[in-house]
Image (tube, grey):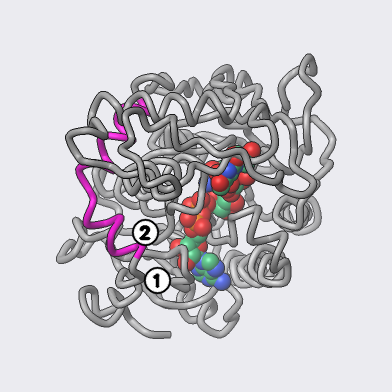
Amino acid sequence: MILVTGGAGFIGSNFVLQWCNNGDEPVLNLDALTYAGNLANLQSLVGNTQHRFVHGSICDSQLLAKLFAEHQPRAVVHFAAESHVDRSITGPEAFVETNVVGTFRLLEAARTYWNSLEGAKKNAFRFLHVSTDEVYGTLEPNDPAFTETTPYAPNSPYSASKAASDHLVRSYFHTYGMPVLTTNCSNNYGPFHFPEKLIPLMIVNALAGKALPVYGDGQQIRDWLYVEDHCSGIRRVLEAGTCGETYNIGGWNEKANIDIVNTVCSLLDELAPPASRQVIHQQTGKKVEHYAELVTYVTDRPGHDRRYAIDARKIERELGWKPAETFDTGIRKTVAWYLANQDWVKDVINGSYRDWVTQQYGGEKA
Ligand code: NAD
Ligand code: DAU
C-alpha cells in the first residue's frame, strides 16, 4: 500500500481518486483537514476499502511512527502543505510549521521505518515529495523556462517554505541514502480546486455577480496544467523515476492572468449565460450581460512573481510522460465541472464542508 499525505486537498484528492481508478493497491490517506481539506472530494470512495482515511497531522511524530509500523507502506506520496501564497503573506508561521517542520517529521518517520526494512522491501521503498515551480523564483519575459538545474530563488514565505522542504528531502538522499524523488510542478487547475485560488475564485464570483479581482496589471504569467495530468506525472515518477532526482512537471501553457480570467468569462457566457441566470452586478446593481464586465483591477500581491514557466523536457525524455489535456480542453472541463457541482461550491462557501469529518465519513481520529 501507499501512504498519501494531504489527500483531502485539491491535488491530493484528485491523486487518490485517480489511484483508485487505475489499480487496486490500497491507499492510506493522512490529512489534518485544515480549511483546505475537504472529505466531500472523496465522497465517491465512501465504502471503498481500497481507501482508508486517517485524520491527523504530518507534524505528529507518534502518529506517523504508528502508521508506518502498522501499515508498512511501500511508498509515501507527500502532498500535505499550506499552499496559498496570499495566506503565507498574512500568516507565514503555519507555512513553516507544516511545510518545513511537518516535512521534516515525515522524513524522520519514513527514515526510521525504511531503516527497519531489509532486502527487496528496502530497495523498493520510495518517498515522493510534491513541490512547486515557485521555488525557482520569477522569470523575465524572455528568460528560458525553469529546468531542474535552475537555482532556487523563492520570493514568498510559501515558496521559501517549499524550498526548505525540498532541500531537506534532497539531504535525506545524500546523507542517508533514502530513496527520495521530488517533483516541481506549475499551476494546477481542475475539479475540487478551493475557491481562494485564481480560476475557481473567478468562476464562483462571476456566477454570483461579484467583482473578479485581478491583481496589479493582470499581466503576470503562470504555466497551467490540468490537475489529472499532474497526478499522472506523479504516478509515472513514482513508478520509474531515479532516486535522488527531481522532475519538473508542466504543460507548456503560459498564460497572462487577465487572459485566464477572460477565458473563464467567455466559457461562462457560453455555458451559463448571465441573462438566463439573471446575474446582477453586485456593485452597480445592473444586469450582467457578459461576465467580463465584473473584472476589477485591485492592489497587487506584495512581492508578486511576474512569470513562471516550466521546461518539462526531462520527464518526457526520461520517463515518457506528456500531458493529455490542452489548456482549451482542460479549462472547458473545469468550468463545466464547477457548473455541475454547485452543491460542492455552496458547501465550501458556507463552511458546511467542514462538518463532513463527523457527519459523512467517520474519519479515524488520531
Ligand atoms: P491544498 O491546500 O488544496 O491541500 C493541502 C492539503 O494538505 C489539505 O487537504 C490539508 O488539509 C492538508 N494538510 C495541511 N496541513 C497538514 C498537516 N499538517 N498534516 C496533514 N495534512 C495537512 O493544496 P494543493 O493545491 O492540493 O497542493 C498540494 C501539494 O502540491 C502542496 O505540497 C503544494 O505545494 C503542491 N503544489 C501545488 C500546486 C497547485 O497549483 N495547487 C502546484 C505545484 C505544487
Ligand atoms: O506555481 C505553482 C503554485 O501555483 C503552487 O505552488 C501554489 O500552491 C498555488 O497556489 C499556485 O500559486 P499562485 O500564487 O500562482 O496561484 P493563485 O491561484 O493564488 O494565483 C494565480 C495568479 O493569479 C497569481 O499571479 C495571482 C493572481 N491572482 C490570484 C487571485 C487569488 C489574481 O490576480 N487575483 C486573485 O484573486
Q: Which residues are magenta?
A: 330-349
Ranked by sequence position, the earlier of labels 2 and 1 is 2
Q: Amino acid at mark 1?
A: His
Specify the quadrant that holds the N terminus: bottom left
Residue 1 is tagged as 2
Q: Farthest top residue?
A: 142
Q: Is residue 293 above or below residue 313?
A: below
Residue 304 is tagged as none
Give whichever of 23, 130 is nearer the camera. Answer: 130
Is disc 1 placed on a helix, strand or loop?
helix
Residue 71 is tagged as 1
Tell me how far mark 2 sits from mark 1, CA to CA.
8 Å
Give whichever of 67, 346 is nearer the camera. Answer: 346
At 55% from the left edge and 37% from the top edge, which residue is drawn? Answer: 187
Circles 2, 1 touching at the beta carbon (< 8 Å): yes
Disc 1: CA contacts within 10 A as few (<14), some (14-19) or many (>=20): few
At 71% from the left edge and 44% from the top edge, which residue is drawn? Answer: 300
Q: How far from the left and from the top, in percent, is residue 96? A: 72, 67
Specify the quadrant that holds the C terminus: bottom left
Which quadrant would residue 349 be assigned to in this image? bottom left
Is disc 2 placed on a helix, strand or loop?
loop
Q: How far from the left and from the top, in percent, is residue 34? A: 48, 71
- Residue 131 in sight from this viewpoint: no
Q: In the image, is residue 331 part of the stretch drawn in magenta?
A: yes
At 54% from the left edge and 21% from the top edge, which residue is drawn? Answer: 253
Q: Amino acid at mark 2?
A: Met
Q: Is residue 46 above or below residue 79?
A: below
